[in-house]
Amino acid sequence: MTTLAVNHLSFAYESNQPNILNDITLSPKPSTFNLLIGPSGSGKSTLLKSMAGLYPKYGGYVTGGTILLNNHDISTLAPFERAKRVALLFQNPSRQFAMRTVKEQLIFALENIQMPVNEITPRVNQVIATLRLEPLLERDLITLSGGEQQRVALATVLALDSDIILLDEPFANVDATSRLAILKDLHELQKNEGKTIFISDHDWTGYHDIVDHLFELDIATKNIAEIDKHHLLQVETASSIHHHFNDTYRLSWQQLALSVGQHQLLQANDFALPLNRLGLLSGDNGVGKSTLFNALAHQIKYDGHIYFDHQPTKKLKLRNGQSNWAWYFKRVPINLSPLLYLMKSKSLSDTV
């Protein structure tokens, strides 16, 4: 059983600056699911990187206290020894990848902890089966969606068989569907394999029924306290109200359709972006959000017509070597976008 104890830890990024963490004492109970909350800048990432042994080795100064892994100062342990017991998943999983394919990455991680060669393949196969990643095994990592990459990063940790899994805002680049799938995987690891999960997140949804302990970092005191997990019930569920705009617009398109290879992302669609609106384009990873923006910027081919001030943008003359997009976007107010757009089911629907 692995134990991790933070004892009166104080930490600063510069020796002459105030502490970002102040007198933190924390010891996650083995085989529990723990959630860390707190506003941006409160020190959540700093605490997790310290608990993983990355700080102060790779930055900052411990101004007081210790972190003990199995009663040993974590800073004195070799990296591969730490990784066998405690592992950290970052916001951006691609930063943890060193190889080309999923299979190569998993093998590389196990080689780094000096696992015997005859044990590597069985361990990789076990992890792939546990997280249902068989279709991804030979895929290039750079071709995976954010959710798929995060699940591969989780598989790497599982392959290392780390008892304690720390996750630092792991859903920042993950869509809602993938987020729920990863949360389910984490809960199963905790329940079925006795892993200790310690995760920081700004989104509280989906946690109430799986969290054992809820911790909050106070940005004012820079200290931590355990609070009642019923605070998670205060999460408000946003509702969508469909609304069709009848506003003035300058940028619009007709029968705009987008495809990547044989895969159609957007069916022929008519739309107009009303002026003086604040907007958000949302949708699952891979649904075509970036592709739409690239089409509007004339960076990729598209079917249909895009108009600015009722003129086809392909016919706008270049000025001073600028692209069509630069020319006409300068003439559109910054807040031209609508209140909210939701990309869904290969078509655009306007939603407030």
Image (cartoon, rainbow, N blue to C red):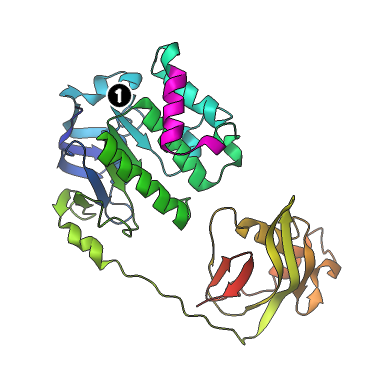
Direction bottom: furthest residue = 246
Q: Could one spot residue 208 in this view of the protein?
A: yes
- Residue 253 location, quadrant: bottom right
Residue displayed at 56% across by 71% down = 341
Secondary structure mostly seen in the magenta stretch: helix
Residue 213 counted in the magenta span:
no
Residue displayed at 23% across by 51% down = 211
Is 62 above or below relative to 108? below
Please name the amino acid that badge 1 sits on. Answer: Arg
Mark 1 crowd level (few <14, some 14–19, many ≥20, 10 Å Cα): some
Is 254 above or below relative to 95? below
Query: Magenta segment range?
Result: 120-135
**Residue 44 image offset from top left, x and y in percent:** 29, 46
Q: Nearer the viewer, residue 85 or 215?
A: 85
Label 1 sits on a secondary structure element that is helix
- Residue 196 location, quadrant: top left
Is 77 above or below relative to 261? above
Residue displayed at 61% across by 41% down = 143
- Residue 72 location, quadrant: top left
Q: Quadrant of the N terminus?
A: top left
**Residue 265 image offset from top left, x and y in percent:** 67, 59
Q: In this view, does 120 lie to the left or right of 297?
A: left
Residue 122 counted in the magenta span:
yes
Q: Could one spot residue 50 in this view of the protein?
A: no
Q: Mark 1 points at which residue?
A: 82
**Residue 212 image offset from top left, x and y in percent:** 19, 49
Is 3 above or below relative to 23? above
Q: Is residue 226 left or right of residue 203?
A: left
**Residue 81 image offset from top left, x and y in percent:** 31, 19
